[in-house]
Amino acid sequence: MNEWTVGATGVHNGRVALVTGAARGIGLAIAAWLVTEGWQVVLTDVDRQRGAAVADVLGENASFIAMDVSSEPQVVDGVAEVLGMFGRLDALVCNAAVADPHNTVLESLDLSHWNRVLAVNLSGPMLLAKHCAPYLRAHGGSIVNLSSTRARQSEPDSEAYAASKGGLLALTHALAMSLGPEVRVNAVSPGWIDARDPSVRRAEPLSDADHAQHPAGRVGTVEDVAAAVAWLLSKNAGFVTGQEFVVDGGMSKKMIYVD
């Protein structure tokens, strides 16, 4: 088993999922998890070389197409490519993001950076939902958006990222109302997830203090998020739509004061 995989099976359940930002980290873990459950998974990313490589490792149930989700022509072409390959679409996972929450002090925040973060993190999921909606409706499909606990709590100098993720939560419940009952739409908000490559995690392990501060006793893994997403896409979550699921080891419920 390659270090990128959760364990590909080659069994196909007939359902097709599109996962954005899937060349690494949480997106890759979601794609790998869905492959183990028998989904045909199309990974997208702006990193063509790595995206193609990890899709190849995941096996015959994984494919890769390059896509910048902030570009409507690329989204249109990508969705058409998925339909051309498989003739259907059952799930959309919007994970692609400008992921670094920190920018610079507000007075120096460049408008072009602000616009780029919102274009990828917020406009991208809207564009994907817009162009995937007819095909998701046809098969009673589902959308999961990857937001963040930073939608509700912040550190300094993270205005663009926080705004984009807060907007994504609002977009999630708006889409749930617009696309229901045929399509369910939910969001997963990760907290601290160690999304580094396995080799880096082994070489530079997190400290005991990093883990101990979490009520769950540890920092999160990409598989923690993938499991939540897979459940939301499943029939077991058929009565769940318009919701946010926080995967943060309890940190957002912890009262923290400096003694």
Image (tube, grey):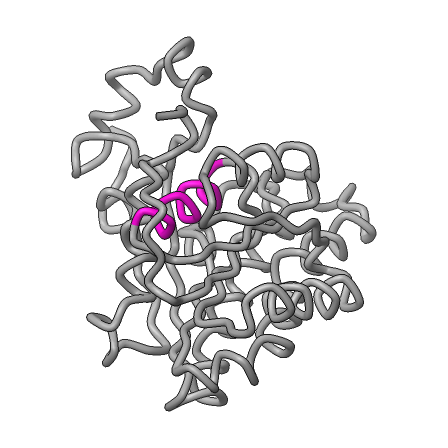
Relative to 224, residue 123 above or below: below
131 or 242: nearer the viewer: 131
258 or 204: nearer the viewer: 204
Relative to 142, residue 250 above or below: above
Q: How many marks?
A: 0
Give the residues in magenta: 25-36
Relative to 76, residue 134 above or below: below
Q: Position of residue 201 (x, y in %)?
A: 40, 18
Q: Position of residue 20 (x, y in %)?
A: 56, 54
Q: In the displayed structure, does residue 163 sit left or right of residue 149? A: right
Which quadrant of the view contains residue 118? bottom right
Q: In the displayed structure, does residue 135 sit left or right of residue 140? A: right
Please check the rendered image and state whether residue 46 is part of the magenta-colored stretch, yes or no.
no
Which quadrant of the view contains residue 12? bottom left
Quarter of the image containing the N terminus? top left
Residue at 54% in and 54% down = 42
Residue at 61% in and 51% down = 44
